[in-house]
Image (spheres, helix red, strand yellow):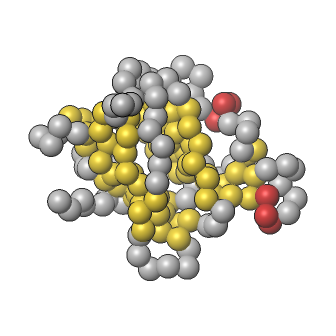
Amino acid sequence: MTNKLYSQTPNDTIANGMAFKLGSKLTLKLVKNSQNSFDYKVIKYSEFTEQFKIFETEKLFEKNPEKETVEVIFGIGYYKEGKDDKDFQTVMLSRNNYSFPLQFDAEIKIWNKEEFEKTSVTPLNPGSRHTELWPYKIDFLALINFRQHSFK
């Protein structure tokens, strides 16, 4: 099975995976596909250049999120006061606004490498927010193959 990756596209494009540049805030709407998983479309997109405290992220999400969406923020966060280079990390924040748990795959394009590489991501419980951290700069993040998750 192969996945096609698309760069940020208009919200009428439905795909199994798209890549987003560092500094992106988006809202995704899932669309059931024939493989019993989900493709998706981007229904909201904006640049996100704000650097944020990693453990103070609730205010970054919509107060009243649209139901049956996934919100994602891909940016730079920091620990402590953000005064030292080592305090900064590449961060993906996500919130599942569906009524069921979700799993997806992700690939990252690290700043000094040519190819995307697979990275692990944790399943998203319904109504929950989640944080993924990387200790190095990532230029692009690809979100691929959304599916309903079963905690067994």
Residue 20 visible to an observer of this rendering: no
Viewer can see residue 71: yes
For the point 24% across and 60% down, the residue is 4
Q: Residue at x 61, y 53 (%)?
A: 133
Query: Residue drawn 85% across and 63% down?
Result: 84
Eyeballing the image, is 40 above or below 58?
below
- When asked about the image quadrant of residue 20, the answer is bottom left
Percent from the top left, x then y, of residue 96? 45, 30
Give x and y (percent) for residue 71.
48, 36
Please state, as top left, top right, bottom left or bottom right, where the N terminus lies in the image: bottom left
| Residue 9 image point, x, y percent | 34, 53
Please count the marks in the image. 0
* Residue furthest front as drawn: 152
- Image position of 120 (left or right of 39): right
| Residue at the left extreme, as displayed | 34
Q: Is residue 152 left or right of residue 62?
A: left
Residue 150 located left or right of residue 87: left
- State the image coordinates of residue 32 (x, y, percent, origin top left): 20, 34
Picture quadrant where residue 33 is located: top left
Residue placed most toward the observer, 30 or 104: 104
Locate the C terminus by quadrant. Answer: top left
- Please say if 114 is above or below 13: below
Above or below for 113 versus 1: below
Q: Residue at x 68, y 36 (%)?
A: 57
